[in-house]
Image: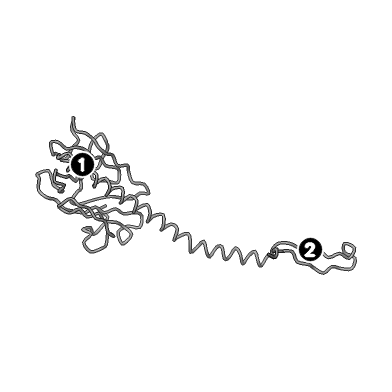
Amino acid sequence: MPKLNFCKTRATKPNSFFGRSIYTCGFTLIELMVTIAIIAIVALIGIPAFGDFILNNRIRGQTSDFVGQLTYARAEAMRTATRVTVCPGTSGGCAGSQWENGWVVFNDTNANAAVDSGETVIGIGAALDGGNTLRSAAFATYISFRHDGTSTNIAGSGLAGSFAICDSRGFGDKARAIAISASGRAKTLPADAAGSGVSNCGT
């Protein structure tokens, strides 16, 4: 294989270095400027795309984690034949309606959607990073599963609804919706898709 050689032979004056040829290596200023311009163009195209790639992966990962927690809560309700509730908050109890700050999964033995003395916390969800939000109108402060896996309110009636998870790009096809049927099953889809059950980020 021939070797790459960036050195060019330059003609010399008769008295330069005893008549020997002078070798110059490297790039010319024009070549360097063209290379920098190409790199700049590639960066302008690639950096925004890479930013979207990171945001997409983050919001999909967070959606998957939350759906996993809901699926676990539902499975535990059926396995133990008890009420299992998920609410925004910490191991210390339920708090507010901003699910992005974290959530707690617990055996809600008295079905009041609150962590009471003697009730077992079986899962904790960490706060979402990236400034993302997770809100719901139907499940503003809790979502609860009965022994048969159905989603229910405190009174025991079936309850369906959706969560919206959004990032800095706001509501649209980049945001995600988590639709919960009355049977307790969850499905994810773009927030602006038909049947998502959400029309904004809930903020």
Left or right of 180 in this view: 172: right
Q: Dot 1: within a 10 Å radius of its alpha carbon, few (fewer than 14), some, or many (20 or more) residues?
A: many
> Mark 2 and mark 1: span between their CA atoms?
77 Å
Instruction: Tell me the residue that label 1 is attached to.
Output: 76
Left or right of 115 in this view: 170: right
Q: Earlier in the sequence, mark 2 or mark 1?
A: 2
Quarter of the figure with residue 156: top left
Q: Residue at x 78, y 67 (%)?
A: 9
Q: Residue at x 23, y 45 (%)?
A: 97
Which label belongs to residue 47?
none
Q: Amino acid at mark 2?
A: Tyr
Q: Residue at x 26, y 42 (%)?
A: 103
Picture coordinates of residue 80 (x, y %)? 17, 39
Mark count:
2
Left or right of 121 in this view: 9: right
Judged from the image, the secondary structure of the residue bearing numbered disc 1 is helix
Q: Verify CB contact (< 8 Å) between mark 2 and mark 1.
A: no
Compared to 107, does 18 lie above or below?
A: below
User: Which of the two residues, 99 or 111, is positioned nearer the viewer here?
Assistant: 111
Picture coordinates of residue 143 (x, y %)? 19, 46
Q: Dot 2: within a 10 Å radius of its alpha carbon, few (fewer than 14), some, or many (20 or more) residues?
A: few
Instruction: Tell me the residue that label 2 is attached to.
Output: 23
Compared to 143, does 93 lie above or below?
A: above
Judged from the image, the secondary structure of the residue bearing numbered disc 2 is strand
Q: Residue at x 9, y 44 (%)?
A: 155
Residue located farthest toward the top when viewing the structure as drawn: 118
Q: Amino acid at mark 1?
A: Glu
User: Which of the two residues, 169 or 148, is positioned nearer the viewer here?
Assistant: 148
